[in-house]
Amino acid sequence: DHARHMTHVGEMMVEGKAPDYQIMDQNKLHAVADRVGVEREGKNDEEVFEELVKLAKEDLTRFEGAHEKPFHWLSRSILEDRVSKLEACNIMPRGVFGTISENIAQTHVGMDADPVNLVFQGLKTSVADFGSEHIATDLSDIIFGTPKPVVSEANLGVLDKDYVNIAVHGHNPILSEMIVKAAREMKPDAEKVGAKGIKVSGICCTGNEVLMRQGVPVLTNFSSQELPIMTGALDAMVVDIQCIMPGIRAVAECFHTRIITTSVNVKIPGAYHVDFVEDRAVDKAHEVINLALAAFKERNSDRISIPEIKHKVVAGFSLEALMDIFSAVNADNPIKVLTDAIDSGELRGVVLLAGCNNLKRIHDNNHLEMAKELAKNNVFMVTTGCAAGAYAKAGMMTWEAVEEYAGDGLKAFLGRLNEANKLEEKLPLVFHMGSCVDNSRAYDLMTAMARQWGVDTPKVPYAASAPEAMSEKAVAIGSWCVTLGMPTHVGVYPYITGSDLVNGIALQIADDVYGGYFMWEEDPHKAVEKILYALDDRTWKLKVHRQAMEKYETESISAGW
Ligand code: XCC
């Protein structure tokens, strides 16, 4: 749905119906066009963009049965070996919506009764999810800019009682980017109501989107989304899609805070609703901000209590930004900086810490404990979603955290990058790659490493973890992580352990077929042990295979893993 919305805005831009949106990143436009096979010769940027949007729509809407037509965006963003594997297993989706429709039909009463067949369809849908996440991230970068390193701050202390405070919450940069823009324009209006200005801060993945691109501070993540209202200093919470707890409305009733829904498919009884339409985006953002200004006038200053807790955050690490940082050490082959560090044993591998908060766990505890332990064991960490929110709030996206938690290898690796880049603000312990949709960035990093080593992704010492997985979307993301070759830890038991067959597929058979597999482990320390084992196993095999290659002077490496 995120990809559909981005593509829809792209179409409106092409038709001249969304004047508040522009192509902000030409380099990304060109790079994506080259990757997905859109010819640029003799075309201007608008024409290239038009073709890209057309291709995205085709990929989203193509029906199954059109076997001769591939899912371009997907098949050109992953390794050829992975495409062959997906084809061989008959789980290569042709289009996104068709695959979802098959899925829904197949699980209807009286339909498929074969658990294995159902699992395959689920995996196919998860791969379609990866393809559409890639479309969403690529189009967001083209329209709003590819993130670059940025310094900001996080936790409830980012609220300022002298300002009109607006929280943007949800997942969608299409709205939140406009709120940020309008808030900057409307400072004089805020001064008229007695405030020093307007302060926008973020919750969940909308927060991640505007942190990465605009440096907007992070308020909090999923499980603690009600707390900013309870400071008595939040004038409006503007929500778009996903992860909005309906209970925020009940909490807001105790204060002056306006809860403002904006999406046609996300409404909460009793909340304000501003129907956000893309053809009048900035106007709609002004409407939202006017509601916050009215609320500011109703504040009860006796009830304001903002915890004085906030931490510096160094974020903005798109894959492009990471490659820029590596290229200060090796301009000809940036990714080799990372693979060399693993080859030499300085780093033990890479881990993507992703996903949600889950109310079954102590808030953020699994995220924080695992990162500390992985850091001690010299693992390079990237993060997205509410996991990123946890690290931001806890001050783990700073160099100070590197000094406190990193093992010698990780410290030396990051220190070398700092030195080569002459960075004013030193690199953090955990690298923020964006919102949940941006997990595609993290997989692209794995793909780049695989290309450098000349292997398929299941041979790369790279694992994923969702220490506090919760949402349905996390099921899709975890499943494509496995299908695309990652050992994938989940810190909460999923609802499949009742079936030995299905659980066995997740834990073992997936490994035999795809090279990725799930690990369920609630204890964060034991989870790290399992992840380290998975990384070390891959590093060892990679070494053995490469020695064999050298010995027999062959280019091809064993196909098995
Ligand atoms: Fe929602 Fe993305 Fe999960 Fe957080 S992490 S609880 S989905 S906001 Ni994706």
Image: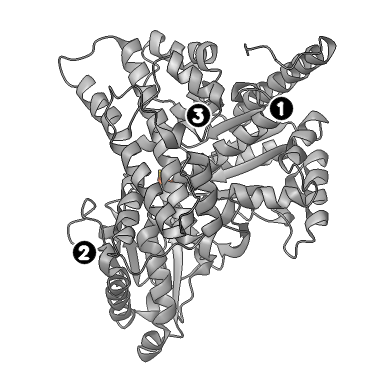
Can residue 372 be seen at all in this image of the molecule?
yes
Picture coordinates of residue 160, whole percent (x, y): 49, 75
Q: Residues within 10 Å of mark 2 (few under 14, many from 20)?
A: some
Q: Which residue is drawn at 78% across and 14% down?
A: 549
Above or below, 200 relative to 466: below
**Residue underneath mark 3:** 481
**Residue underneath mark 2:** 273
Q: What residue type is labelled 2?
A: His
Whole-angstrom CA distance, mark 3 to mark 1, is 20 Å
Q: How crowded is mark 1: few (under 14 residues within 10 Å), some or many (20 or more)?
A: some
Can residue 155 be seen at all in this image of the molecule?
no
Picture coordinates of residue 243, whole percent (x, y): 35, 48
Q: In which quarter of the image is the N terminus?
A: top left
Q: Quadrant of the C terminus?
A: top right
Earlier residue among tags 3 and 1:
1
Q: In front: 274, or 421?
A: 421
Picture coordinates of residue 327, whole percent (x, y): 74, 49
Check disc 3 and report its element: helix, strand or loop. helix
**Residue underneath mark 1:** 453
Whole-angstrom CA distance, mark 1 to mark 2, is 52 Å
Q: Which residue is drawn at 46% across and 44% down?
A: 38
Which mark's residue is nearer the viewer, 3 or 1? 1
Quarter holding ligand 1: top left
Q: In front: 393, or 437?
A: 437
| Cβ–Cβ under 8 Å for marks 2 and 3 | no
Which mark's residue is nearer the viewer, 2 or 3? 3
Q: Which amino acid does label 3 sit on?
A: Cys
Q: Residue at x 44, y 44 (%)?
A: 437
Whole-angstrom CA distance, mark 2 to mark 3, is 36 Å
